[in-house]
Each structure stands twice: as structure tokens, then as C-alpha cells.
Amino acid sequence: MGPGNDSQISRLILLGLSNEPELQPLIFGLFLSMYLITVFGNLLIILVICSDSHLHNPMYFFLANLSFVDICFTSTTVPKMLMNIQTQNKVITYEGCLSQMFFFILFAGLDFFLLTVMSYDRFVAICHPLHYTVIMNPQVCGLLVLICWIISILNSLSETLMVLRLSFCTVMKIPHFFCELNQMIQLACSNTFINNMMVFFAAVLLGVVSLTGALYSYCKIISSICGNSSAQGKYKAFSTCASHLSVVSLFYCTSLGVYFSSAAPQSSHVSAVASVMYSVVTPMLNPFIYSLRNKDIKRALIRFSGMAMMKGTIILG
């Protein structure tokens, strides 16, 4: 294929994580297992929160939204990867690549913003408990989630549309298991300065600003907890936000690791493997972190399983 704009590109090739034929069944089984665990685990969290009135508060409203976003986030990349392995066909259409890129950036941004909003929720609950119900009322919670969606959609749309201005000189072979924005920009033969600037500003917006907000909230939380003379109050406060802090640390560390690794030369394979951590592994671990470290969720799971067993007994009876 000679030089030309992206309208001449009808299909692209996703090279995946490995070209070794003997590793393909292992990769397929591993990713299929992780995907099923992610979907069913996060779906269970959503069902438990929706069905249990004890969990109808802002903290679990945001958690249900995060679980939904995690399902969508993983579904953007893994099913296509599994289909490519199963059919031994690594081709993806140009339109499909742009769609995958759009939704990946969208749900990654939503993850960033929702984690920041959840840290703000814990800040208000612990540092301003008397005003919590007033500040975090249902209208405010809905507005915060709506703002997260609007900003993420605008960011994803702008970054995806900017790819349309690029020209590509060769057959597009992407050394990744999905259409990753940085890889697409690196393969372009036209000037990518504006695209790189867009990626930089998006990284500042999604990473630095949201991380700063989360860190500020937890600094205030820790300061407030340390000022609490009650040991029982300290334990309750720490246990309340421990699960969320674990998720924040895991997601930010892995995603920032991928960002810095992508800046290094000849790191396409490293970046692809590292992307698995925040795009597949983290969404899979979230339900376990929240269910194992959160007493309210554990009690709700017990009640939910008991209700399910009772309904099953009634139906069978």
C-alpha cells in the first residue's frame, strides 16, 4: 500500500500478545477465564447493590456504576481478541478499529473519573459526616456521574477524530491485542505533533488531575482519621475506604506504568503486556477487592444468595 490517507485503509492486523502457535490455546483459555470472571463478578456486584436496600447510598451507587464501566471496558477488547485467536484471523476493519479505540478511551476515562468521584465521596463521608446526606444527595450523585460521562465522551471523541487526519504508508500491523491509540499514532507517516499533544493533554486531564483529586481526598481523610481519638472510629473509617484505596492504587499504578512504558523506545510488546494489567486484570479483581474487604457487601452477598436459594426452592417446590 502506498502513501495515502486513512480512507484507503480497509483493514488492519492485530499482532496480539504472542505469535507462538503453541501459546495461543493457553492465552485463549486464560483470557476467556478472566473475561468471564470480570463479567459475572461485576454483574453480581450490580445485582446485589440494586436488590439490597441497605446499599442504596452514594458510595454503592458509584460502585455499581464502576462495575458497569468495568464490564464495558473489558468487553471492548477481550472478545475481539478471543475471536481472533479462535478463528486464527488477526484482521480488524479500519472502522472497527476506530470504534474499539473510541470505546476503550471512553471507558478508561470513566474509570479514572469515577474513582476520583468515589474518593471525594469518602472524603465527604469521613471529614464532613454531619453534612454528608446534604452534600451527596441523589441529584448531586447523578450529576457527578453525568459529568464523568460527558467529559469522557468528549475526550474520546476528540482523540478518535484526530486519528482521521493521519496518513499511513504501509500495511497496518499493530503490535498489540487491540487498537491502542499510541500504537496507531506511531504507525502514521504524516505529522503527528497535534495528536501527540492531544494524548499529552488527555493524560494530564485523566491521569494527573484525577489522581491529584484522589490523593488530595485521601490526604484529608488520613488527616481526619489521625485526629480522631477513638480507636474504633479510626478502624471503621479505615475499613470503609480501604477497598476503594486498593482499587485506586492498582488501577493508577498499572495505567501510569503503561503510559511511561509506551514512551520508551522498542517497548510495544512490553506496553501490550502491561496493558493487560489495567484493562483486564484490574476490572477482574475489583469485585473481589470490594467483596472481601467490605463488610456491607459481604453481608449483602449472603442475603442475596439466601434470597436466590429461597426462590429456587419455591420454584422447584
Image (tube, helix red, strand yellow):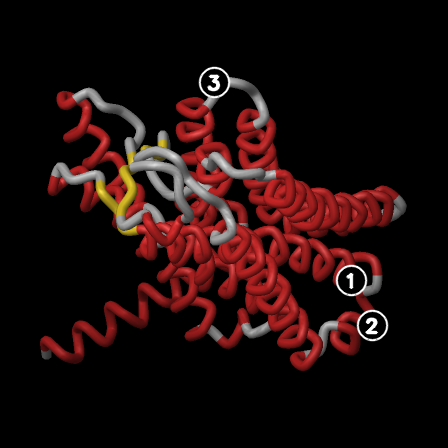
Sequence-first disc among 2 and 1 = 1
Q: Nearer the viewer, residue 185 or 152?
A: 185
Residue type highlighted by circle 3:
Gln
Say which residue appears at 36% left-offset and 61% top-offset. Answer: 44
The picture places residue 71, in percent across and down from the top left corner, at 39, 56
* Quarter of the view holding residue 31: top left
The picture places residue 76, in percent across and down from the top left corner, at 36, 53
What is the crowding at mark 1: few (fewer than 14 residues within 10 Å), some, or many (at least 20)? many
Q: Which mark is residue 43?
A: none
Q: Which mark is residue 124?
A: 1
The picture places residue 69, in percent across and down from the top left corner, at 46, 59
Report the residue marked by disc 3: 266
Q: Is residue 162 left or right of residue 233?
A: left
The image quadrant where one finds the C terminus is bottom left
Q: What secondary structure is found at the residue carrying circle 3? A: loop
Say which residue appears at 39% left-offset and 38% top-offset. Answer: 3
Q: What secondary structure is found at the residue carrying circle 2? A: helix
Q: Nearer the viewer, residue 173 or 258?
A: 173
* Quarter of the view holding residue 231: top right
- Residue 230 seen in the figure: no
The residues tagged by marks 2 and 1 sit, at their Cα atoms, a distance apart of 8 Å
Foreground: disc 3 or disc 1:
3
Residue type highlighted by circle 2:
His
Report the residue marked by disc 2: 131
What is the crowding at mark 3: few (fewer than 14 residues within 10 Å), some, or many (at least 20)? few
The residues tagged by marks 3 and 2 sit, at their Cα atoms, a distance apart of 52 Å
The picture places residue 120, in percent across and down from the top left corner, at 73, 58
